[in-house]
Amino acid sequence: MQKMSSALIIIVCLVLTGVGSVSAASNKCRVVEVEETRLVLECERDASRFDVDDQVKIKTVRKGAAVEGC
């Protein structure tokens, strides 16, 4: 019984620590203006979760080749 409760406590701790890492802000944005190293973005949703001096990672949307269907 004690082994089972210890395993349950460990599982609960792992789940709770995983929830914190998923709560990062995310949004889909498009570039409105480009000026040397500065980008102006327009986002789909409210951007209030982002603060000044936050670091963000930007990925481009992949443009795949046209696929012919049946």
Image (spheres, rainbow, N blue to C red):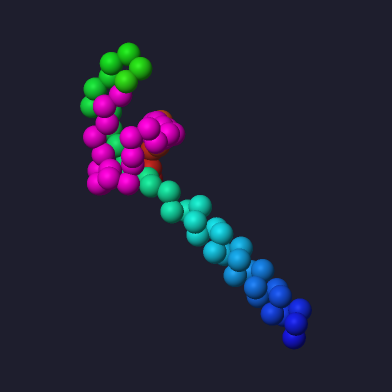
Residue lying at 32% horizontally and 13% vertically, measured from the top left: 36
Q: Can you tell which quarter of the image residue 27 is in?
A: top left
Return the residue nearer the eye: 45 or 10.
10
- Expressed as whole percent of the image width and height from the top left, the position of residue 39 reads 30, 24
Residue lying at 35% horizontally and 17% vertically, measured from the top left: 37
- Of all residues shown, which one is farthest toward the top? 36
Q: Is residue 2 above or below residue 25?
A: below
Q: Confirm whether residue 38 shows in the render.
A: yes
Tell me the chief SS of the magenta region: loop
Query: In the image, is 61 to the left or to the right of 12?
Result: left
Residue lying at 64% horizontally and 69% vertically, measured from the top left: 11
- Expressed as whole percent of the image width and height from the top left, the position of residue 6 reads 71, 75
Specify the quadrant that holds the C terminus.
top left
Q: Which segment is the magenta one?
A: 39-63
Q: Is residue 41 magenta?
A: yes
Residue lying at 56% horizontally and 59% vertically, measured from the top left: 17
- Expressed as whole percent of the image width and height from the top left, the position of residue 51 reads 33, 39
- Of all residues shown, which one is farthest toward the bottom? 1
Q: Is residue 36 above or below residue 57?
A: above
- Of all residues shown, which one is farthest toward the front? 52
Q: Is residue 35 above or below residue 40?
A: above
Q: Can you tell which quarter of the image residue 13 is in?
A: bottom right
